Amino acid sequence: MANDRCGVLDPQHGTRTVMDAELVIVPDADALARESAQRLADLAREAVESRGRFSVALSGGSTPGALYRLLAEEPYRSQILWKQVHLFWADERCVPPDDPGSNYRLAYEALIAGVPVPQENVHRVLGELGPKAAARAYDRELRRFFGEMRPSFDLVLLGLGSDGHTASLFPDSEVLEETERLAVAATAFYDSRPAERVTLTLPALNAARQILFLVSGIEKAGIVQTVLADMQGCLPAGRIRPVAGQLTWLIDAAAATHLLGVLPLGPPAAVQKRM
C-alpha cells in the first residue's frame, strides 16, 4: 500500500502496527448510523456527478439495518438521487427473498420500500436458486453491469463477525483463495447456524473504490483490536485491503474499548474521534 493511514498500538506487545485505513470512532450506535448515512449520501452525490451512477454493495445485520432505516428518512431520502443508485449485496443466504434470514428482505423492508429506487436497479442474489446456481447467476450479473474484470463498486458496506469473518468469508474457508470468480457459494457454520450462502470474493471486494466497515457494540471490541493488528491477513476481515480504493473503519466507542487507551498514533487525519 502506498500510504499508512491508520496506526494503532498492540497493548500486549507495545508495538506499532499500521494498516492503510481510516479509523473513525463515534460515541454510539446512533451516531454510527448518522455518520455512515452522511458518508453514503456524499459518495452517492460524487459518483453520480462524475460517473452518472452510484453502485453500492449492502450487508445484513442490525448495524447496517439502522443505516438503511435512516436513509429512507429525510433528509437523505431527498438528498440521494435514487434513480441513479444501483443496489447489490456483499453476501446472501440461499433462502427465498421473503425469508426472515434474507439480507435482501432486511434491505427491502428498511430501505428499498421507502425510497424511489427503480426495481431494475436492485441486483439481488437469487438465493432461492441454490448456492451454486445463485453464485453463477450473480457472477454473470456483476460482469454484465460492470463490463470489466473486477466490479469497481463505489461503496461496499461490510460488518465484522466475532470470529473475524466479513461478508460470508469465514476463517479457513477455501473461498478465501478464490482469484477469478466474483461471487461464489460458501457454507457458513456460525453461531451454530449452518447456512448455504453466496458471497462476493476478495478480488471483487478489494476492487471497490470505497469500503466501509460498520462495527458496533462491546462484544466486538476484542475482534476489532485483533483485526486492526492483523498485518498478515490471518483473518478474513484483515484481508480486506482495496487495491486502489479507500478502506474506512467506522466503529462506536463500545467496539473501540480496547483501542481508546492507545490511540491516536498515525497521521492526524488517520484516526478521528467524533463526539
Image (cartoon, grey):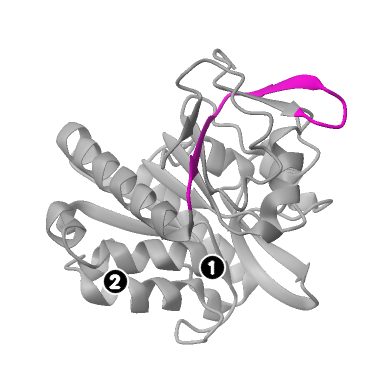
What's under tag 2, amino acid-wise?
A: Ile
First reached walking from the N terminus: tag 2 or tag 1:
1
Relative image position of residue 10 (x, y in whole percent): 78, 29
Q: Is residue 40 left or right of residue 265?
A: left
Task: Name the chief secondary structure element in magenta.
Answer: strand
Q: Identify the residue position indicated by label 1 in the image.
A: 61
Tag 2 secondary structure? helix
Q: Quadrant of residue 269?
A: top left
Please tell me which residue lies in front, 261 or 91: 261
Residue under the point 38% across and 61% down: 67
Disc 1 residue crowd, few under 14, some 14–19, many 20+, Cα 10 Å = some
User: Mark on residue 112?
Assistant: 2
Q: Is residue 208 left or right of residue 235?
A: left
Work out which quarter of the rendered image holds the N terminus and state it: top right
Disc 2 residue crowd, few under 14, some 14–19, many 20+, Cα 10 Å = many
Query: Contact (CB < 8 A) between labels 2 and 1?
Result: no
Where is 165 relative to 241, above or below?
Answer: below
Q: Which residues are magenta?
A: 10-27
The answer to if 11 sits in the magenta stretch is yes
